[in-house]
Image (cartoon, rainbow, N blue to C red):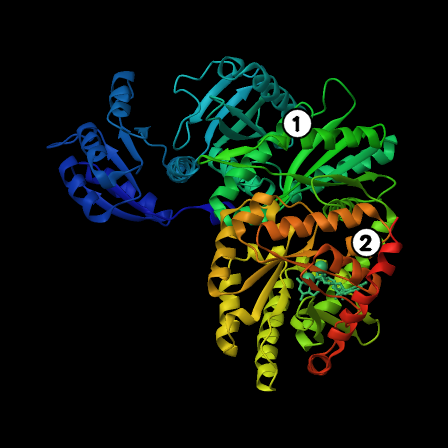
C-alpha cells in the first residue's frame, strides 16, 4: 500500500499569536491536503474547538489572554474533546515546560524552530496513533461489555493451578471470592475435584485443545454444579470460563428421575429396568453366567383399588415396594452384594407388577429362594387406616439363557409363568416352560375369538330343567351358556368362562345372560307355561365391578317379570372374600326377591357361618359327589350330611349331574329336594323346555327310579 493511500486528511486547528507562524503552519498543513482553522490565542481556540471539532490541534505555548498549557488543560475537560491529539508547538524545550505540557493533557510537542519538511510526517504519525488509540478504546469497551454479558466466571490459571488473574466473577451466585487471585485451586475445591481440575489444566496446556468438564461442590443436600472450559491461553497459562450449571443439572436429574423411576414407589421403572436387564444379559453372555427374572403380580389387587379407592391402593403399593426392597439382597437395588456373586435389582413395571432381576445365580434354586423371600416378606398383613389387608403375590420365573435370549423374551416368558401361577390358584410361583408359551398363545387366540363371539352375538343359552322329587314336576331351569364356534365347534363354558373372567369380558356376557333369561321367562309365561325361576350362574368376578345389583334390577324391570322368576347361583369361592361390599350386594339382590343358591357345593371352602349369615336359599351338591354316590360310601355320606345340614338351616338341597336311575334312587333315599341332570334332560334350547314341561317325562322317570331303589342300594360298596 502506498504511503499516499494511508495518509489521513483532516481538520487542523492552528493556535498561535504569531501570524507568520500561523501562515507557515497553514501552508504546510494545506499542502498535506488538510483543512485548516486558525485561532490567535487559547480562548479563541476553545470556542473554535467546540464549533468545528478538529481532528488535531497545533498549539503555541506562550500566548496572550490564555496560554497554550492552560488552554490544553481546559480542552481536556470538555466532554466532546475525547482523544483529540493536542501538539504543543514550543520554543521552551526545557524539561519543566514539557512536563507541564504533558500534565495538561498534551499528546506530543514540536520544538521551534520547526523542521518544516518533516512536520507533515509528524502530524500524520500523531493522527495515526490517535486513530489506533481510538480503535483500541472501542475494542476495549466492546470487550468489557462482552465480559459483562458472559454469565461465566472468567479467570486465568497458571500451570500450578494458581489463579493468576480474576477477570470477571460471573453473574449470579459467585463461585470465586473476589480475593481469589494468587490462590491455588486446591485451596478452593475438595481434594478430588481439585485434582481433576489440575489434571484438566495440564491437559489443556499439553494438548492445546479446549477442555470441558463439570464439577460439583457445596453441601451434599444442595450441591452446586459448574461447567468449566479451559483454553490454552499464553505464557503457559489457561483461560478458564466457569459457568454455574446447577439449575440445568438439577433439571436434568429431575427429568432422569421422571423418565427412569416410578414416582409412587421411587423404584426404577420399566425403562430403567430393561436397561439393567440388557446389561446383565450381555454380561452373562460374555462371562457365561445365569440371570433370573422374577415377575411378581399382586393377587386381586384391582379389588383393593376398586373397593377401597386408589389412595389406599397407592399406600399399599408403597408398602409392598418397601418390603420387597428390604427382601432383595443388600437392599441396594443396583449394586453387587457382599456375601455372594449375586446382585439384585427391583423395579415396578406396571400397576401391581414388580420385577426382580437376579444376576449371578447358580441354578434355579437360587431363584426359588428369592421367590420364597418375596412370599415371606408379604406374609404379614398390611394395615392402613385401622384396616388390615393381606396381599399375596403370584410369581413367574424365567432364567437366562434357557428361557429367553434377550430382555424382551425373558420378560414375556416370566410374565407367562406368572400367569400360570395365577391359574394354579395364585399366591405361588412357577418356573417358565415352553409348554406354557403354547398355552398362552392358545389363550390369546381364544380370547380373540371370544371377543368376536360377544360382538357378533354368537353365544347362546341352553336351559336345563330342575325337578322337584316330591311333586315330580319342573321347579325351575338353569341357564347355561353355549358357544358354538364356526370352525372349532362347541367350546365348553369350563374353558371360556375363566378366560372371560380374566379378560373382563365376563361383565358384558353376564349382563347379556341375565337379560336373555328375564326375556325368556316372560316369553314362557306368555306362551302359557306356569312361571318357574330361571337360575343364572354369576361369576365371583362380577362382585368386584360394583354394579351387579343395579344390572339385575334393570333386567328385571325392563322385562317386567317378577323378581322371584330369577335365581342366582353363586360359588363358594365368593365366601373367601371377606368384604363388606359383597355382603351388601347379596343383601340388595335378596331384598329384590331374587333367590340365591350355592353352586358346586362341597368342592370349595364354605363356612357354615357364611351360609347362615348370607341367608342363601339352596345348596347344589356338586356333580362329583353324585357321580359315585352308589360306589363310594364316603361320597354318599357327604351327600347325606349336606342334605341334613341344609335342611337344618332351612335350605333346599339340589343334586346336580344325575345321570342314572340308580343315582336318582340314591338321592331320593337321602332326601334331596330337587334334582338336575342328563337323566331328565341335557341343557336344551328354550323351545324344547316347553315340550319338556308339557310332557310328563320327569314324573315317569322318578316313578321308575323309586321302584328300582333297592337295585341302586345293592351297588353300594
Ligand atoms: P354349573 O353351574 O355347575 O353347571 C352345571 C354343569 O353340569 C353344566 O355344564 C351342565 O351341562 C353340566 N351337567 C348338568 N347335568 C349333567 C349330568 O347329568 N352329567 C354331566 N356330566 N354334566 C351335567 P356346562 O354347561 O358345561 O357348564 C359348566 C360350568 O360353566 C357351569 O357349571 C358354570 O359354572 C359355568 N357356566 C355356564 N354358563 C355360565 C354363565 O352363564 N355364567 C357363568 N358365570 N358361568 C357359567
Ligand atoms: Mg350352576
Ligand atoms: Mg354346578
Image coordinates of residue 51 in percent, x first then y, are 19, 48
Residue at x 25%, y 46% (from the top left corner):
53
Residue ranking furthest to the bottom: 527
Q: In this view, does 522 lie to the left or right of 119?
A: right
Q: Is residue 660 visible?
A: no
Image coordinates of residue 278 in percent, x first then y, are 76, 40
Q: In which quarter of the image is residue 520?
A: bottom right
Residue at x 49%, y 68% (from the top left corner):
553
Depicted 71 relative to depicted 96: above or below? below
Q: Distance between the residues labelled 2 and 1?
A: 50 Å
| Secondary structure of the residue carrying numbered label 2 | loop
The disc label shown at residue 462, or none: none
The residue nearer to you, when weighing 261 against 92, is 261
**Disc 1 CB within 8 Å of nearest ligand 1 atom:** no
Depicted 586 relative to depicted 365: above or below? below
Label 2 neighbourhood size at 10 Å, few (<14), some (14-19), many (20+)?
many
Q: In which quarter of the image is residue 13?
A: top left
Image coordinates of residue 395 in percent, x first then y, are 72, 40
Q: Are marks 2 and 1 in contact (CB under 8 Å)?
A: no
Label 1 neighbourhood size at 10 Å, few (<14), some (14-19), many (20+)?
many
The disc label shown at residue 629, or none: 2
Q: Earlier in the sequence, mark 2 or mark 1?
A: 1
Q: In this view, does 334 lie to the left or right of 596?
A: right
Q: Can residue 543 be seen in this view?
A: yes
Image coordinates of residue 62 in percent, x first then y, are 18, 28
Residue at x 20%, y 33% (from the top left corner):
77
Mark 1 = which residue?
327
The residue nearer to you, when weighing 389 against 95, is 389
The residue nearer to you, when weighing 350 against 631, is 631
Amino acid at each position: 500500500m502506498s504511503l499516499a493511500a494511508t495518509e489521513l486528511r483532516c481538520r487542523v486547528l492552528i493556535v498561535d499569536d504569531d501570524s507568520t507562524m500561523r501562515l507557515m503552519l497553514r501552508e504546510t498543513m494545506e499542502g498535506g491536503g488538510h483543512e485548516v482553522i486558525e485561532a490567535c490565542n487559547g480562548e479563541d481556540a476553545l470556542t473554535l474547538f467546540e464549533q468545528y471539532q478538529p481532528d488535531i490541534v497545533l498549539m503555541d505555548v506562550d500566548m496572550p489572554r490564555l496560554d497554550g498549557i492552560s488552554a490544553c488543560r481546559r480542552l481536556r475537560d470538555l466532554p466532546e474533546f475525547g482523544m483529540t491529539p493536542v501538539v504543543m508547538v514550543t520554543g521552551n524545550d526545557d524539561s519543566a515546560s514539557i512536563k507541564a505540557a504533558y500534565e495538561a493533557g498534551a499528546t506530543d510537542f514540536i520544538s521551534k524552530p520547526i523542521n518544516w519538511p518533516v512536520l507533515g510526517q509528524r502530524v500524520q504519525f500523531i493522527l495515526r496513533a490517535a486513530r489506533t488509540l481510538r480503535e483500541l478504546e472501542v475494542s476495549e469497551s466492546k470487550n468489557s461489555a462482552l465480559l459483562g454479558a458472559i454469565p461465566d466466571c472468567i479467570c486465568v490459571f497458571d500451570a500450578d493451578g494458581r489463579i493468576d488473574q480474576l477477570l470477571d466473577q460471573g453473574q449470579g451466585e459467585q463461585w470465586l471470592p473476589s480475593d481469589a487471585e494468587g490462590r491455588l485451586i486446591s485451596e478452593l475445591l475438595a481434594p478430588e475435584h481439585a485434582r481433576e481440575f489440575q489434571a484438566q489444566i495440564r491437559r489443556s496446556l499439553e494438548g492445546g485443545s479446549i477442555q470441558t468438564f463439570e464439577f460439583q461442590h457445596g453441601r451434599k443436600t444442595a450441591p452446586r454444579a459448574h461447567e468449566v472450559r479451559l483454553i490454552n491461553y499464553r505464557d503457559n497459562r489457561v483461560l478458564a470460563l466457569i459457568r454455574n450449571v446447577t439449575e440445568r443439572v438439577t433439571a436434568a436429574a429431575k427429568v432422569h428421575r421422571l423418565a427412569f423411576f416410578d414416582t409412587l414407589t421411587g423404584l426404577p421403572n420399566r425403562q430403567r429396568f430393561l436397561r439393567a436387564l440388557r446389561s446383565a444379559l450381555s454380561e452373562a453372555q460374555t462371562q457365561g453366567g445365569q440371570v433370573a427374572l422374577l415377575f411378581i403380580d399382586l393377587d386381586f389387587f384391582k379389588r383393593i383399588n376398586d373397593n377401597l379407592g386408589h389412595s389406599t391402593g397407592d399406600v399399599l403399593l408403597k408398602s409392598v415396594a418397601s418390603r420387597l426392597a428390604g427382601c432383595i439382597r443388600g437392599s441396594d437395588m443396583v449394586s453387587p452384594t457382599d456375601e455372594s456373586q449375586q446382585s439384585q435389582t427391583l423395579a415396578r413395571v406396571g400397576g401391581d407388577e414388580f420385577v426382580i432381576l437376579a444376576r449371578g445365580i447358580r441354578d434355579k434354586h437360587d431363584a426359588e429362594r428369592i421367590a420364597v423371600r418375596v412370599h415371606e416378606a408379604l406374609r404379614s398383613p398390611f394395615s392402613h387406616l385401622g384396616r388390615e389387608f393381606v396381599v399375596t403375590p403370584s410369581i413367574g420365573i424365567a432364567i437366562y439363557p434357557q428361557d429367553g435370549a434377550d430382555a424382551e423374551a425373558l420378560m414375556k416368558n416370566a410374565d407367562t409363568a406368572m400367569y400360570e401361577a395365577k391359574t394354579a390358584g395364585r399366591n405361588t410361583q412357577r418356573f417358565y416352560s415352553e409348554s406354557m408359551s403354547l398355552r398362552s398363545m392358545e389363550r390369546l387366540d381364544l380370547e380373540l375369538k371370544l371377543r368376536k363371539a360377544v360382538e357378533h352375538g354368537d353365544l347362546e343359552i341352553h336351559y336345563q330343567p330342575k325337578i322337584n322329587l316330591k311333586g315330580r314336576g319342573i321347579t325351575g331351569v338353569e341357564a347355561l351358556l353355549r358357544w358354538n364356534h364356526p370352525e372349532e365347534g362347541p367350546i365348553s363354558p369350563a374353558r371360556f368362562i375363566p378366560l372371560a373372567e380374566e379378560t373382563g369380558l365376563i361383565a358384558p356376557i353376564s349382563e347379556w345372560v341375565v337379560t336373555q333369561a328375564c326375556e325368556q321367562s316372560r316369553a314362557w309365561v306368555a306362551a302359557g307355561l306356569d312361571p318357574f325361576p330361571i337360575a343364572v350362574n354369576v361369576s365371583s368376578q362380577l362382585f368386584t365391578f360394583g354394579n351387579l345389583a343395579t344390572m339385575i334390577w334393570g333386567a328385571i324391570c325392563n322385562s317386567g317379570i317378577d323378581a322371584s322368576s330369577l335365581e342366582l347361583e353363586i360359588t363358594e369361592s365368593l365366601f373367601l372374600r371377606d368384604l363388606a361390599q359383597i355382603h351388601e350386594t347379596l343383601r340388595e339382590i335378596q331384598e329384590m326377591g331374587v333367590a340365591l343358591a350355592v353352586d358346586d357345593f362341597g368342592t370349595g371352602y364354605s363356612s357354615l357361618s357364611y351360609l347362615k349369615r348370607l341367608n342363601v336359599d339352596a345348596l347344589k351338591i356338586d356333580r362329583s359327589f353324585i357321580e359315585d354316590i352308589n360306589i363310594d360310601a364316603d361320597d354318599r355320606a357327604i351327600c347325606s350330611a349336606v342334605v341334613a345340614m341344609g335342611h337344618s338351616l332351612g335350605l333346599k338341597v339340589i343334586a346336580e349331574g344325575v345321570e342314572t336311575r340308580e343315582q336318582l334312587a340314591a338321592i331320593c333315599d337321602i332326601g334331596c329336594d330337587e334334582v338336575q341332570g342328563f337323566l331328565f334332560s341335557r341343557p336344551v334350547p328354550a323351545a324344547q323346555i316347553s315340550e319338556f314341561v308339557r310332557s310328563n317325562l320327569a314324573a315317569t322317570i322318578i316313578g321308575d327310579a323309586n321302584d328300582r331303589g333297592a337295585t341302586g342300594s345293592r351297588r353300594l360298596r
